[in-house]
Image: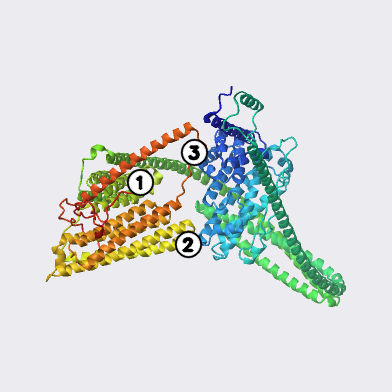
């Protein structure tokens, strides 16, 4: 019994929904497992497979929402190792994750900052590293948010770098500084890790050391790109600015260059990095930015990550989640259900559906395989680029070494030739020297003995001088304290002077004798060939020297005896000095203790004074806060009255509103003065408190009176005035909110409040009653001016339509271009017809004035018929305003920002305005006038052109707007009946809405006529309009449609150029 043929749609949607939910749950579960395995408390590096799954998850969901949802729940404050591994994983996700990860991390900046600040205050081996790593991540996020041209992995081309830097030197300068700050954060982390680790090979192979070294792989990748970009930017800066200006930049770059080179060298020596990353080699010396050609020698450092083969015990990961396979039990249950009740309606699958599903699966697999091949190809390309760069650098080094070897070879050849010449000369001189040495050896021994004696005398003299200097210093110190020490010192100085003079005299004699000896030795060296002949003379000189040496020995003994006596006297003097020094030290200690006590007392007084001053500042700030809170209550109460229904009956005059607004503006000036006084002197807030109270009351009074004035104003002005009052109150509350914080209080500026008050003041001046008394002699000029301004407005409209047509031809094509051209062409023809009508109306008015004024002047005629004149002015303004509105509507339609209905309504409006101008001109015209008949013909032409605009607009709307084809072939009878009922409900709703809009249109027209002041007396054509402003073309304040007596058949005469208006659905 197969009675169930159709399965409800809710069941099918529930099945599909369960499949999506299961996929999402499986994804969340896998991400949670990967995050928990990657970020744990074990002191071991993060496994690459877990980090890779997390990164693939960000690409799967196009963001890091799931990652942060689990990361926020981790107990990061409980373990520094957990926080360290969290920072490492976040760094990898930022670099290799989806581009939207940066936005998600920006929203969680506060979480990263809190973790860094927490561990920065704790003394833990990982705590300080976590603090530095958190600052690096925050700086990285800020930099890439400010410069979206640079992705988080910093891999951009040189063209993108040039575009990001721009042509402005200030922007390049600022970008370079930010790159330096970025590099400082990276290097600071690497230096901190290096300080905590021993760089030995054994430490880098331990899990604890690898846990700290693992994040440096990302640091190496970032630093290589930052180094290349800073080199490029520095060369660009040196091409724009003088070298002296960039001295600070060069010093900072050199410091970072040496730090980076040391870091790369240290990392390349570790075995841990050798199997994970290929670290580039930096040049021995930094680039010379003062030489522009050095840029060509710069080689971009490339970091290569070798291919990582998955371990054998690791199961291969499937990048495509196959969740469409149903369990066996579900398939069996569906087979039993189909055997019992028949196949489900809408669920039967033919061979084509199965083929489509199989093809989709194959496409997904092929897409994954293609992505994998692309990744491998990109990796191979980067490796080959790195090899090419390394080979080029090696080739360049070999070239330099070859050049250097050639230069060294030439130098060695020159030195060899010089050595050969020197050898020949030395061989010749050796023979002579050997003979001279033998002869001079005997005299040299004697000279050495004399030199030793002289050195001993010099040393003795130096010791005496040193002791004399020490004694002089000690005597100068004690001379200021005691007179007895000064007397002893004077005696000793006299004695020492005598001894010194005697020793100096003896030393002078000895030096003179030594000089004579030197001269004699030099003469002997020059006369080595004749030394045998003068040997007897030299022996005599030797005997004389020996006698002199004996005399010197005797003098030395006498000097030693005198020195012993002086030393004894010095010992006694030193004992006396030591006693005096002990007394002085005791007195100094007492004075120091007294000074310390006085300083402690003074510091206590200063602390008390500082605390009292801070308390006074806090009291003044609390007074300001109380005043600000009370001011907020006053302004909030005034804002509440804007929406209070009981306040609707309250009214006020624009003059009083203007006076209140001016007073409020004056209070803002006093508020600024009080604010400036308080920021200069935080202990005096009297001026600011008084100004705040006055500001709050006057602002509330202005808001309340503005709301009361809006109750008597027109709808447009009332809405604008109410919005301005509400905006003024909100800006005032925003300004008061800035005064609540000590930091924002200094920079609080009421400029926005001042602008809001000025807008209220401007609206109040607009609402003031205008003086309607016009001099009679000005009416004629007003008519001519209005007609001239109307003609100018129409000509401007024609010009704008031509510009729009040219723009439409350039910016669109096909059906849209055809529709736009047809609409703009019809609008152009309508503008031409209106311009002809205005010219004809002007000629008819001149004819009326000439025929009716008699002996009076033109101004007197217009003054005599002031009602008719003001009707003409109003009608001409209506025509000009209608032409302007039609052009603006056409512009919006062409730019696809407006509606076609606006163009249709504008056409009807301009037709009615021209009819009003015709009726106003016909009142005093002669029935047989040729200008009148021509004016009626122009009016009919205008109506035809307006109808053409409407027709072209409707046809263009039908061409542009696509209508959905209604296909009901797949619906059942009940479904069709249900759709029919729903359509009837929509039709009734739209009819009710249409009826309400028609009633609203009628009320608007009634209000329009009421504001225009049109009398029901058919003899009066148009009530005098308010004076228009010269040179300003906008919609008149009064209605422009005159009342024409209806004919007996209740039909309008088309010969008059006037057609009966109809409502257009």
Q: Residues within 10 Å of mark 1 (few under 14, many from 20)?
A: some
For the point 16% across and 65% down, the residue is 862
Which secondary structure, mark 3? loop
Towards the viewer: 187 or 460: 187
Q: Verify CB contact (< 8 Å) between mark 1 and mark 2.
A: no
629 left or right, relative to 1017: right
Q: Residues within 10 Å of mark 3 (few under 14, many from 20)?
A: few
List the residue tagged with mark 3: 968
Q: Is residue 780 above or below residue 305?
A: below
Q: CA distance from mark 3 to mark 1?
A: 79 Å
List the residue tagged with mark 1: 682
Q: Residues within 10 Å of mark 2 (few under 14, many from 20)?
A: few
First in sequence, mark 3 or 2: give its number.
2
Residue 853, image x, y percentages: 14, 68
First in sequence, mark 1 or 2: give its number.
1
Towards the viewer: 360 or 381: 360
Q: CA distance from mark 1 to mark 2?
A: 64 Å
247 left or right, relative to 516: left
Q: Is residue 50 above or below residue 561?
A: above
List the residue tagged with mark 2: 810
Residue 208, image x, y percentages: 68, 37
Q: CA distance from mark 3 to mark 2?
A: 42 Å
First in sequence, mark 3 or 1: give its number.
1
Marker count (numbered)? 3
Q: Is residue 49 above or below residue 866?
A: above
Answer whether residue 800 is visible to the viewer in this image: yes
Residue 1006, image x, y percentages: 23, 47
Q: Quadrant of the N terminus?
A: top right
**Furthest residue toward left:** 855
Please tell me the numbered disc located at residue 959: none
């Amino acid at each position: 019994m197969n009675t169930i043929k159709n399965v409800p749609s809710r069941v099918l949607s529930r099945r599909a929904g369960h499949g999506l939910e299961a996929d999402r749950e499986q994804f969340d579960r896998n991400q949670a497992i990967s995050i928990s395995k990657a970020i744990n408390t074990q002191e071991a590096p993060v496994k690459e497979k877990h980090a890779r799954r997390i990164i693939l998850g960000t690409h799967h969901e196009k963001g890091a929402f799931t990652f942060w949802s689990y990361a926020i729940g981790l107990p990061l404050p409980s373990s520094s190792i957990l926080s360290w591994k969290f920072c490492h994983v976040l760094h990898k996700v930022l670099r290799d994750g989806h581009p939207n990860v940066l936005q998600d991390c920006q929203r969680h900046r506060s979480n990263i900052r809190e973790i860094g600040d927490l561990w920065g205050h704790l003394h833990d081996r990982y705590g300080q590293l976590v603090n530095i790593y958190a600052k690096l991540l925050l700086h990285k996020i800020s930099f890439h948010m400010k410069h979206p041209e640079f992705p988080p992995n910093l891999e951009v081309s040189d063209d993108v770098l040039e575009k990001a830097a721009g042509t402005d030197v200030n922007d390049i300068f600022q970008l370079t500084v930010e790159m330096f700050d970025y590099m400082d954060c990276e290097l600071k982390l690497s230096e901190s890790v290096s300080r905590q680790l021993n760089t030995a090979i054994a430490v880098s192979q331990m899990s604890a050391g690898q846990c700290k070294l693992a994040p440096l792989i990302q640091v190496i990748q970032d630093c290589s790109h930052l180094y290349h970009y800073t080199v490029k930017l520095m060369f660009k800066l040196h091409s724009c600015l003088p070298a002296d200006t960039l001295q600070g930049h060069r010093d900072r770059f050199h410091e970072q260059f040496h730090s980076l080179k040391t870091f790369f060298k240290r990392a390349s020596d570790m075995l841990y990095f050798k199997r994970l990353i290929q670290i580039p080699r930096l040049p021995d010396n930094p680039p010379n930015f003062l030489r522009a050609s050095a840029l060509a020698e710069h080689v971009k450092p490339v970091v290569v990550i070798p291919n990582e083969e998955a371990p054998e015990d690791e199961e291969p990961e499937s990048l495509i989640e196959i969740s469409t396979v149903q369990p066996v039990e579900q398939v069996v249950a569906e087979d039993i259900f189909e055997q019992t009740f028949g196949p489900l309606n809408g669920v039967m699958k033919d061979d084509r559906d199965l083929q489509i599903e199989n093809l989709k699966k194959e496409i997904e697999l092929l897409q994954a395989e293609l992505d994998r091949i692309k990744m491998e190809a990109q990796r191979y390309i980067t490796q080959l680029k790195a090899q090419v760069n390394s080979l080029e650098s090696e080739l360049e080094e070999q070239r330099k070494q070859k050049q250097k070897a050639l230069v060294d070879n030439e130098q060695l050849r020159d030195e060899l030739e010089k050595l050969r010449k020197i050898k020949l000369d030395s061989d010749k001189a050796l023979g002579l020297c050997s003979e001279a040495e033998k002869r001079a050896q005997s005299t040299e021994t004697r000279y050495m003995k004399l030199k030793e004696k002289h050195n001993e005398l010099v040393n003795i003299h130096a010791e005496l001088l040193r002791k004399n200097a020490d004694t002089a210093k000690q005597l100068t110190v004690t001379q200021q304290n005691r007179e007895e020490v000064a007397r002893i010192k004077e005696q000793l100085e006299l004695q020492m002077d005598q001894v010194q003079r005697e020793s100096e005299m003896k030393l002078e004699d000895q030096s003179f004798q030594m000089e004579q000896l030197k001269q004699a030795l030099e003469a002997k060296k020059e006369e080595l060939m004749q030394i045998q002949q003068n040997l007897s003379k030299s022996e005599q000189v030797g005997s004389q020297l020996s006698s002199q040496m004996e005399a010197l020995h005797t003098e030395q003994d006498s000097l030693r005896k005198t020195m012993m006596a002086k030393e004894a006297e010095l010992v006694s003097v030193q004992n006396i000095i030591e006693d005096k020094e002990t007394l002085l030290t005791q007195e100094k200690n007492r004075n120091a203790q007294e000074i310390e006590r006085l300083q402690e007392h003074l510091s206590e007084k200063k602390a008390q004074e500082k605390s009292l001053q801070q308390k006074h500042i806090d009291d003044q700030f609390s007074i300001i806060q109380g005043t600000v809170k009370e001011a907020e209550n006053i302004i909030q109460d005034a804002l509440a009255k804007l929406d209070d229904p009981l306040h609707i009956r309250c009214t006020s005059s624009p003059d009083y509103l203007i006076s209140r607004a001016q007073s409020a503006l004056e209070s803002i000036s006093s508020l600024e003065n009080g604010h400036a006084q308080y920021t200069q002197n935080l202990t005096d807030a009297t001026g600011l408190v008084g100004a705040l109270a006055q500001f709050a009351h006057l602002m509330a009074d202005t808001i309340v009176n503005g709301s009361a004035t809006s109750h008597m104003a027109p709808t447009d002005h009332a809405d604008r005035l109410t919005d301005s009052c509400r905006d003024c109150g909100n800006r005032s509350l925003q300004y008061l909110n800035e005064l609540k914080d000590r930091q924002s209080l200094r920079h609080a500026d009421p400029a926005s409040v001042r602008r809001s008050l000025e807008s209220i003041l401007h609206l109040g001046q607009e609402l003031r009653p205008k003086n309607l008394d016009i001099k009679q002699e000005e009416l004629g000029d007003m008519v001519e001016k209005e007609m001239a301004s109307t003609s100018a407005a129409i000509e401007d409209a024609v010009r704008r339509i031509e510009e729009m047509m040219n723009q439409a031809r350039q910016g669109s094509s096909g059906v849209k271009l055809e529709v736009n051209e047809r609409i703009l062409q019809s609008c152009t023809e309508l503008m031409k017809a209106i311009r002809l009508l205005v010219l004809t109306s002007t000629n008819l008015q001149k004819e009326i004035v000439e025929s009716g004024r008699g002996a009076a002047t033109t101004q007197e005629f217009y003054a005599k018929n002031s009602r008719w004149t003001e009707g003409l002015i109003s009608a001409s303004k209506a025509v000009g305003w209608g032409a302007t509105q039609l052009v603006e509507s056409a512009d919006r339609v062409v730019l696809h920002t407006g509606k076609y209905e606006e163009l249709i309504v504008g056409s009807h409006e301009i037709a009615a305005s021209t009819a009003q101008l015709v009726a106003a001109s016909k009142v005093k015209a002669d029935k047989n006038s040729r200008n009148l008949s021509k004016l009626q013909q122009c009016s009919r032409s205008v109506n035809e052109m307006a109808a053409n605009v409407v027709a072209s607009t409707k046809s263009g709307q039908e061409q542009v707007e696509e209508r959905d084809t209604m296909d009901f072939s797949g619906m059942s009878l009940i479904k069709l009946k249900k759709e029919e009922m729903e359509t009837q409900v929509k039709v009734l709703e739209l009819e009710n809405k249409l009826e309400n809009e028609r009633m609203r249109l009628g009320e608007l027209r009634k209000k329009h006529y009421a504001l225009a002041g049109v009398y029901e007396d058919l003899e009066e054509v148009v009530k005098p309009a308010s004076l228009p402003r010269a040179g300003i073309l906008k919609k008149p304040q009064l209605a422009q449609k005159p009342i024409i007596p209806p004919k007996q058949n209740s039909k309008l005469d088309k010969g008059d150029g006037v057609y009966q208006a109809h409502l257009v659905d």
